[in-house]
Image (cartoon, rainbow, N blue to C red):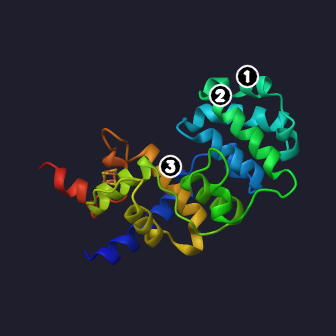
Amino acid sequence: MKHRQRVEHFRTDLLNWAEDNLRSFPWRDTTDPYEVLVAEILLQKTAAEKVAPIYIELLATYPSLNDLAEADRERLGDIIYSLGFQNQRSDALIKIGQELRDSGVPSEFQDLLELPYVGRYAANATLCFAYDEPQPIVDANVVRVYNRIFDKDFDYRDEDTWSFAAAVLPAEDARRFNLAILDFAAMVCHPKVPDCDKCFFTDSCHYYQANKTG
Ligand code: SF4
């Protein structure tokens, strides 16, 4: 199968898989830029299941950028303590509240990148999930899927990887595709032993074809 056909096949099959398999998290029910950005800051290096109850409590306590700007650092730190990096995250959240309370969350990539605790992934995720822009999101889990399927040796920090992910992303359905690949990586294409028996892509996956026995 040619590369382009394989990419199209993967896109279609992943979006079909998403119909019945996407996980439910509170930040997935909103397109409010503030709520999306807060989620991306809490989710960094932290399991989504752990973040969910903390996220709900944080937004109930600080429902707006202005509330966050006025937050007591100790109280905010107590709320997010169990996620780790509570001092860094608290400082970043309060600073974001102070910087953006008048202007709102920016919709430009470079402006988002200037915020504390916001890197390329968080900026693109905010653009995609809040502003419906077709921007790819790439982390170590997403890269693992691409490396296995397409026989690549990508690192999530490399420019090539982001270009590849941008080319695979369907412009019309970017939000659902991004959610789907995150969930597929977490639920099926696991880091150590992928659950290939549950996968829709065995026929075209390089890793599966190279490692199957019998
Ligand atoms: S066949 Fe296995 S290795 Fe390939 S994408 Fe599916 S789960 Fe991952």
User: Of callouts 2 and 3, which one flags the residue occurring earlier in the amino acid sequence?
Assistant: 2
Q: Tell me the distance, in whole angstroms, between the alpha carbons under discs 2 and 3.
A: 26 Å
Q: Which residue is mark 1?
A: 78
Query: In the figure, is residue 194 to the left or right of 59?
Result: left
Query: In the figure, is residue 39 to the left or right of 149?
Result: right
**Residue placed at 34% from the left, 44% from the top?**
195
Q: Taking the image as drawn, is residue 199 in sight?
A: no
Are circles 1 and 2 on residues that touch, CB within 8 Å?
A: yes
Q: Horizontal and vertical percent for residue 19? A: 55, 59
In this view of the protein, which residue sits in the foreground, 132 or 64? 64
Query: In the figure, is residue 110 to the left or right of 67?
Result: left
**Residue placed at 36% from the left, 51% from the top?**
144
**Residue placed at 63% from the left, 46% from the top?**
40
Q: Which residue is mark 3?
A: 183
User: Of callouts 1 and 2, which one flags the residue occurring earlier in the amino acid sequence?
Assistant: 1
Q: Tell me the distance, in whole angstroms, between the alpha carbons under discs 1 and 2.
A: 8 Å
Q: Secondary structure at mark 2?
A: helix
Label 2 crowd bin: few (<14), some (14–19), many (20+), radius 10 Å: some
Q: Horizontal and vertical percent for residue 65? A: 83, 46
In this view of the protein, which residue sits in the foreground, 132 or 159? 159
User: Of callouts 3 and 1, which one flags the residue occurring earlier in the amino acid sequence?
Assistant: 1
Q: Amino acid at mark 2?
A: Gln
Look at discs 3 and 1 and give the one toward the viewer.
Answer: 1
Q: Secondary structure at mark 3?
A: helix
In this view of the protein, which residue sits in the foreground, 75 or 198? 75
